[in-house]
Image: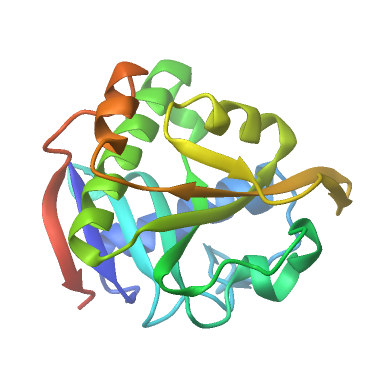
Amino acid sequence: MIHILQGYSLTDVRLASMFADRKALFVDLMRWSVPVVDGAYEIDQFDGADATYLIAVEHGEHVGSMRLLPADRPHILDSLFPDLCDTAVPAGTHVAEITRLCLPCRLGTARRLEIRNRLISAMVDHAATAGIASLTGVVSSGFLAQILRMGWHCERLGKARRHFGSSLAAFRVDLDAHSSERLAEAGIYTPGAIVAPLARAA
């Protein structure tokens, strides 16, 4: 169900439909002030050859996704929100930033939760093979409360602050050999979520 692609091409229907759903969610619904390409696709400065996309696919098209950015080069936390960290922003080849979790509203609450859990499962499995030991992210304070309850080793990186009218906070998850077990105990992790492992976008 989960396809993993590095880089992007709008000729790939999985990626094109992902960017279209990102525009529908983040721009049309949530009113984020982020770039829109050709009036149809939400694509920002961090989308590119170094970004890794985990895409839930049904009938060849996107039904959910997240983006991982390498933290040894510019990413959202260090470029836009470094004030969310009380100390240095986590960085290095072993760190990846989770961004752009996109779960289309058309799917309904239960289906969105199921796909979110599949994406998290795939992310943990991918991290184990890609040498990723830590994950960071910037989220709303409310969503951070959910992330902290998932059972893995997760900590706040600093106090929540107001940005663009929302209360945002940064977090770090440190992965280990038992992360999937702890997520499974919380009803989140299921093995075998990845059906198409890491490949370059066409």
| Quadrant (top left, top right, bottom left, bottom right) of the N terminus | top left
Nearer to us in this view, 198 or 148? 148
62 over 89 or under it: above or below = above
112 over 84 or under it: above or below = above
> Looking at the picture, how far across and down is residue 128, in whole percent?
22, 55
Task: Identify the residue shown where x is 42% and y is 34%.
Answer: 152
**Number of numbered discs visible in the structure rendering:** 0
Task: Report the side of 47 relative to 77 (left or right).
Answer: left
> Looking at the picture, how far across and down is residue 93, in whole percent?
39, 76
Task: Identify the residue shown where x is 53% and y is 63%.
Answer: 40
Task: Identify the residue shown where x is 68% and y is 51%.
Answer: 157
> Looking at the picture, how far across and down is residue 114, in whole percent?
34, 24
94 over 147 or under it: above or below = below
Task: Report the side of 121 relative to 169 (left or right).
Answer: left
| Quadrant (top left, top right, bottom left, bottom right) of the C terminus | bottom left
Task: Report the side of 56 relative to 163 (left or right).
Answer: left
Whether residue 137 is visible to the viewer of this picture, yes or no, is yes
Which of the 4 quarters of the picture holds residue 197?
bottom left
73 over 157 or under it: above or below = below
